[in-house]
Image (cartoon, rainbow, N blue to C red):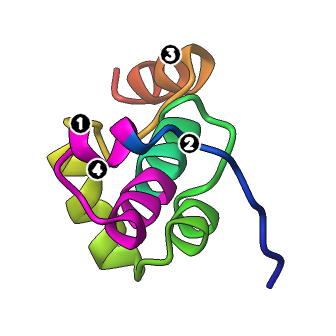
Amino acid sequence: MQTVSINLPETAFAALRKAPDEFVREMRIAAAVKWYELGELSQGKAAEIAGLTRAEFIAALARFKVSPLQYTAEELIEELAGES
């Protein structure tokens, strides 16, 4: 595993009312959820980056109001065309 260091203002922790370690954990989850939502990561890889199991990641998706089922427009058209 690799360590990445970033500088954050002290007010960042207070804004979310989180200790630094909780803030970092939440930031990892939020980034993984967003990258998954954008289609840049698979669900499994996003869960790994978030430091969660797949089931925990699906729960995080619900918390962030992101569907666990991500389709591109093409995939959705194909899916709907197959139902007729």
> What's the CA distance linking mark 3 and mark 2?
43 Å
Q: Quadrant of residue 42?
A: bottom right
Q: Nearer the viewer, residue 20 or 55?
A: 20
Q: Is residue 67 left or right of residue 74?
A: left
**Label for residue 54?**
none
Q: Is residue 82 left or right of residue 11?
A: right
Sequence-first disc among 2 and 4:
2
Residue on which disc 2 sits: 8
> Residue at (69%, 38%) from the top-left corner?
40
What are the residue bounds of the magenta stretch? 11-28
> What's the CA distance linking mark 1 and mark 4?
22 Å
Q: Quadrant of residue 82?
A: top left
> What's the CA distance linking mark 2 and mark 4?
25 Å
Q: Confirm whether the magenta stretch covers residue 32.
A: no
**Label for residue 61?**
4
Task: Classify 49 as above or below 38.
Answer: below
Q: Amino acid at mark 4?
A: Leu
- Residue 55 in the image, given as x and y percentages of width and height: 30, 77
Residue on which disc 3 sits: 77
Q: Confirm whether the magenta stretch covers residue 12.
A: yes
**Label for residue 15?**
1
- Residue 66 in the image, given as x and y percentages of width and height: 29, 37
Sequence-first disc among 3 and 2:
2
Helix, strand or loop at label 4? It is helix
Helix, strand or loop at label 2? It is loop
